[in-house]
Image (cartoon, rainbow, N blue to C red):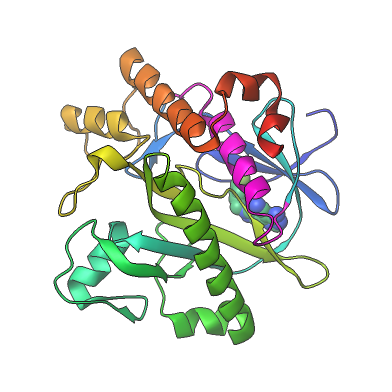
Amino acid sequence: MPESAVHVGSGKVRELYALDTDRLLLVASDRISTFDVVLPTEIPDKGRVLTGLSAFWFSRTQHLVPNHLLALRDDGRGTECRRLEMLPIECVVRGYLAGSGWKDYRATRAVCGHTLPAGLIESQRLPQPIFTPATKAQSGHDENIARDAAAELVGRTRFDEVERIALELYAFVSDHARARGIVLADTKLEFGVDDTGRLVLGDEAFTPDSSRFWPADAYEVGATPPSFDKQFVRDYCESLGWDKTDPGPELPEDVVTGTRARYVEAFERLTEMSFDDYLTDPSVVLT
Ligand code: PZK
């Protein structure tokens, strides 16, 4: 990091720095988490795959909403971005019934105030994608909230705008992914507001860490489809009988290699670009 960058935050697998009053630097590490625990073994290039994919989507969705991306660092893992006033909600869109959406549906037949048809089963495609906001938990799990609660947090006009934009983004990206053999089951987006009051897409977008990617050829309704990226890691952890508390296990070399290959495969299928070309010059994803 050539300029003086002040560390301002840590996520499980990412770091955030301030470059100046208007700009932040998001750095994606090669750390991987599973069952909410960060493992001691890294996946080489995972941070670069996520940074490149996110930048690809920012570039491809500019016609739908402005975003915070200013530049990619030459190392391929840093994103310089415009500093925003972030909205205090996670903007989740679900096209399929998985994770907490499936859990809430089973308990109440509704998700965040969307009452759904009876008789849906796990992983089923929804009649139409739904916007299911969640609170930003400081630690622990984000909690799904009713639409009215979310509208109270950001204001009704802003709520209507983020819902519309988030659904448009999901439709655009899920169509693109499905045509390339990947099901985008759901995704979490974060928006902010710039100094002129414009809504801007921030954070990372449509990466395997912020979305549920399923391989289309293994997708089956009524089952838990394998995660596109983390399935080897999950299967290995399950085989150990690890109790899913910190610290997690070290990963063997074949699990690391296989998982890295899955991240690179997701990048290459979705971008239709060579990951080696990205490593040579990250700006290829912006063109
Ligand atoms: C912002 N986070 C999440 C936490 C991370 C990331 N453009 C922006 N303007 C202002 N704030 C943020 C962003 C973005 N993106 C993102 N928190 C604040 C986060 C910890 C580490 F890498």
State the residue in front, 41 or 213.
Answer: 213
147, 185: nearer the viewer: 185
Q: Residue at x 84, y 54 (%)?
A: 22
User: For the view shown, which residue lies furthest in the front direction?
Assistant: 179
- Residue 150 appears at what percent x and percent y? 50, 78
Q: Quadrant of residue 275?
A: top right
Q: Looking at this rendering, what residue extends furthest in the top direction?
A: 253
Quadrant into which the C terminus falls: top right
| Residue occupying the point 58% across, 60% down | 190
Quadrant of the drawing holding the N terminus = top right
Q: Is residue 46 magenta?
A: yes
Q: Please say if 164 is above or below 284.
A: below
Position of 51 with respect to 264 (left or right) is right
Q: Is residue 210 visible?
A: no
For residue 17, side relative to residue 191 (left or right): right
In the image, taking residue 103 as reference, residue 64 lies left or right, namely right
Instruction: Answer yes or no: is residue 238 visible.
Output: yes
Q: Which residues are magenta?
A: 42-68
Q: Residue at x 26, y 70 (%)?
A: 104
Position of 47 relative to 211 (above/below) = above
Residue 55: x %, y % from top left: 64, 42
| Place of residue 207 in the rendered image (x, y in percent of width and height, measured from the top left) | 50, 43
